[in-house]
Image (cartoon, rainbow, N blue to C red):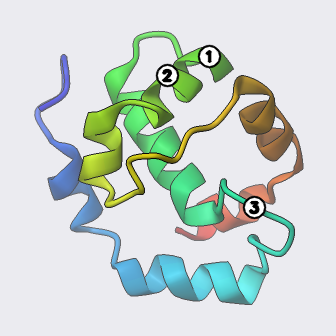
């Protein structure tokens, strides 16, 4: 459960099939140059960040990505980490149409 929301991430993601996210990653070529922050990870990071943080920033997104609960929830590698500058660069270049289609 999130702070003032009456829905949890699992319930919310139940409305979005994983197959849709995977298919959109292929058709939009969102991951063409990505090394770590693939479209799927960015979607999960932004969704979780919006629901879990009162003020969303690149620093809070970095902290969220490096948080063990986030990695466990989305089946990410526990040793994987990301820097704020990587998030900043990815956000500046990512095609927002990918998120609109989801």
Note whether residue 81 is visible: yes
Crowd around label 3: few <14 · some 14–19 · many ≥20 (10 Å): few
Q: Callout 3: helix, strand or loop?
A: loop
Q: In x, y percent, where is residue 81?
A: 56, 39
Label annotation for residue 63: 2
Alpha carbon of mark 3 to alpha carbon of mark 1: how far? Answer: 20 Å
Whether tag 2 and tag 1 are in contact, CB under 8 A, the answer is yes
First along the sequence among labels 3 and 1: 3
Check the image and report above or below for 21 versus 80.
Answer: below
**What residue do we see at 60% from left, 70% from top?**
101
Quadrant of res 33? bottom right
Q: Which quadrant of the rendered structure holds the N terminus?
A: top left
**What residue do we see at 52% from left, 47% from top?**
80
Alpha carbon of mark 2 to alpha carbon of mark 1: how far? Answer: 6 Å
Check the image and report above or below for 43 versus 38.
Answer: above
Alpha carbon of mark 2 to alpha carbon of mark 3: how far? Answer: 19 Å
Q: In x, y percent, where is residue 9?
A: 23, 47
First along the sequence among labels 2 and 3: 3
Q: In this view, does 42 lie to the left or right of 72?
A: right
Q: In x, y percent, where is residue 58?
A: 66, 22
Residue beneath disc 3: 35
Residue beneath disc 1: 59
The answer to which of 67 and 96 lies nearer the viewer is: 67
Toward the top, the furthest residue is 55
Q: Is residue 56 left or right of residue 91?
A: left
**What residue do we see at 41% from left, 87% from top?**
19
């Amino acid at each position: 459960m999130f702070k003032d929301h009456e829905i949890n991430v699992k319930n919310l993601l139940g409305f979005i099939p994983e197959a849709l996210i995977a298919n959109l990653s292929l058709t939009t070529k969102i991951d063409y140059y990505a090394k770590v922050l693939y479209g799927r990870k960015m979607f999960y990071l932004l969704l979780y960040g919006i629901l879990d943080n009162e003020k969303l920033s690149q620093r809070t997104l970095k902290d969220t990505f490096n948080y063990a609960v986030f990695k466990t929830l989305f089946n990410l590698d526990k040793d994987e980490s990301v820097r704020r500058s990587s998030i900043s660069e990815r956000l500046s270049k990512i095609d927002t149409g990918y998120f609109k289609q989801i």
